[in-house]
Image (spheres, rainbow, N blue to C red):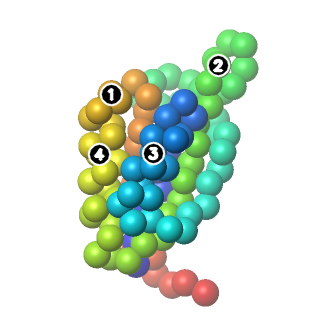
Amino acid sequence: MKMILAIYNVAVDDEVMQAVQAAGVKCYTKWPRVHGQGCRTGPRLDDHIWPGANCVTMMVVQDELAPKVMGVLKELRQTIGQTEGVKAFMLNVEQQL
């Protein structure tokens, strides 16, 4: 199994969720408003100095589905541009309870 962590601007939440669900993701956990700083996008601290926030969506999928999910996230990143900060990381899941 693989865990995919997608981190992205809250402004593109609908687009990201539609893309991963169309790829076959049925289960996920979402942190709806997180703060951070990207290398290209700068801080998103959701305040008057650094406005904006990100979402983090965690998906655990079968090994066979993981490349498809990463692929749709890559396509979305290319479509909306890197300024919206769509990032995705794929990790191995050692054990699940």
Residue that lies at the very extreme toward the right in this rendered image = 47
Q: Nearer the viewer, mark 1 or mark 3?
A: 3
Label 2, on which residue?
A: 51
Q: Amino acid at mark 4?
A: Lys
Label 3, on which residue?
A: 16
Query: Can you say whether 55 is above or below 24 in the image?
Result: above
In which quadrant of the rendered view does residue 81 lie?
A: top left
Is there a contact, CB below 8 Å, between mark 2 and mark 4? no
Q: Nearer the viewer, mark 1 or mark 2?
A: 1
Question: In the picture provided, is 63 more to the left or to the right than 33?
Answer: left
Which residue: 50% across, 22% down?
A: 42
Residue 3 visible? The answer is: no
SS class of the residue under badge 4?
Answer: helix
Q: Amino acid at mark 1?
A: Gly
Image x and y of residue 15, in percent: 45, 41
Q: Nearer the viewer, mark 2 or mark 4?
A: 4
Question: In the picture provided, is 46 more to the left or to the right than 10?
Answer: right
Circle 2 packing at 10 Å, graded few (<14), some (14-19), many (20+), is: few
Label 1, on which residue?
A: 81
Which residue: 68% across, 12% down?
A: 49
Question: In the picture provided, is 81 more to the left or to the right than 4?
Answer: left
Label 4, on which residue?
A: 74
